[in-house]
Image (cartoon, rainbow, N blue to C red):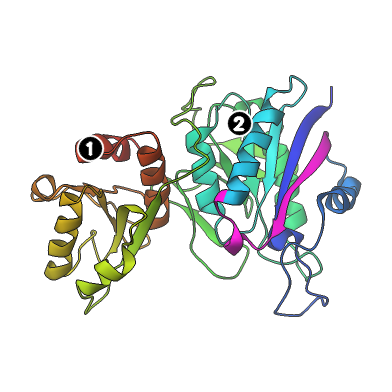
Amino acid sequence: MTTRLTVLATGGTIAGIAGSAIAKDYRAGEIGIEDYLEKVGGLGLEAELSGRQIANIDSADIGPEVWNALHPAIMEALAEESCAGVIVTHGTDTLEETAFLLDLTLPADKPVVVVGAMRPADAVGYDGLRNFANAVRVASDPDASGRGVLVVMGDRVFAARDVRKVRTRGTEAFRGFPRESIALVTPSSLEWFGAPWRQGSATSFEWSDTLPEVAIIYAYAGLEATSVGRQVGQATRGIVVAGVGEGNMPEEVREALKVQVRRGLPVVRASRADEGLVDLEPEDAENGFVAARALNPQKARILLQLLLANGITDPAAIQKKFDRR
């Protein structure tokens, strides 16, 4: 029996056009989902695909407005008995944030696969068709269930909680941390590394249409405490520090952030380094700080937003959630 999959399109490079096979610049989000499905129709994919356009934009412009349309569309598709899984086409720049947000708020009983491309559709070596064919292979596999939201790029499958974009160009632009890829995939094969780790329809968090504002403060040599005041506004409900090394920051910045904690704003220490854990330091409990553990600043922001939206504000309770990532 043919597997039925729903494809939800948001734009990005996978739907981009350069107007030349060798041009450097291109326009993201130019191909609509109907045209794209017609384009992939000749690949001989063993799945019945139906599509819906959620947005058609550069992923740098994706945020709550698109998420608030995408999430219910996925839930609607998953609720259809005939739908075996969902594929989301997405630009690569913010792909990891969308995938992680969905991973925390969707059930895991059917596959949800996010896929993109590093080259526009009319470029030499366009990787979008192969990535999409690989995504179909993954979303069609019953063993993809129970693994949370998955990301397919460059013949690899990543868990949403691990995946991160590490290069600005090239088809091998994504890696995973702390786990690398959890499967290798081609349009005709799929090899999983390990068993599923989630079961059933339970979600980590209730979906929220209004995510609280969380600021990210980027640490650098010479960062002054006044930068905290400039970046934390009246609407800010939490702070993530993209710290140096293991989530470190200048002492005067630390003191300024302790003031923000006393005002009721949770502060999470993450790292601007690409890989590595940020562990609790002895003074974190006294300061009221939270350690991001394996999450990079942008994912730490997503998790903190969901925690705050679900009424979790105590630093110790927040830390328990970060420890589970």
Residue matched to label 2: 144
Quarter that holds the C terminus: top left
Q: Give the range drawn in magenta.
A: 47-64
At label 1, the amino acid type is: Asp
Q: Which mark is residue 314?
A: 1
Does residue 186 appear in this view? no
For the residue pair 44 and 314, the one nearer the viewer reads as: 314
| Residue 48 on image: x %, y % | 84, 33
For disc 2, the neighbor class at 10 Å (few under 14, some 14 to 19, many from 20) is many
Q: How far apart are marks 1 and 2 (CA)?
A: 35 Å
Q: Taking 153 as reference, is 119 above or below it?
A: below
Helix, strand or loop for disc 2: helix
For disc 1, the neighbor class at 10 Å (few under 14, some 14 to 19, many from 20) is some
At label 2, the amino acid type is: Ala
Q: Which residue is drawn at 83% across and 40% down?
A: 45
Whether residue 52 appears in magenta in the rendering, the answer is yes
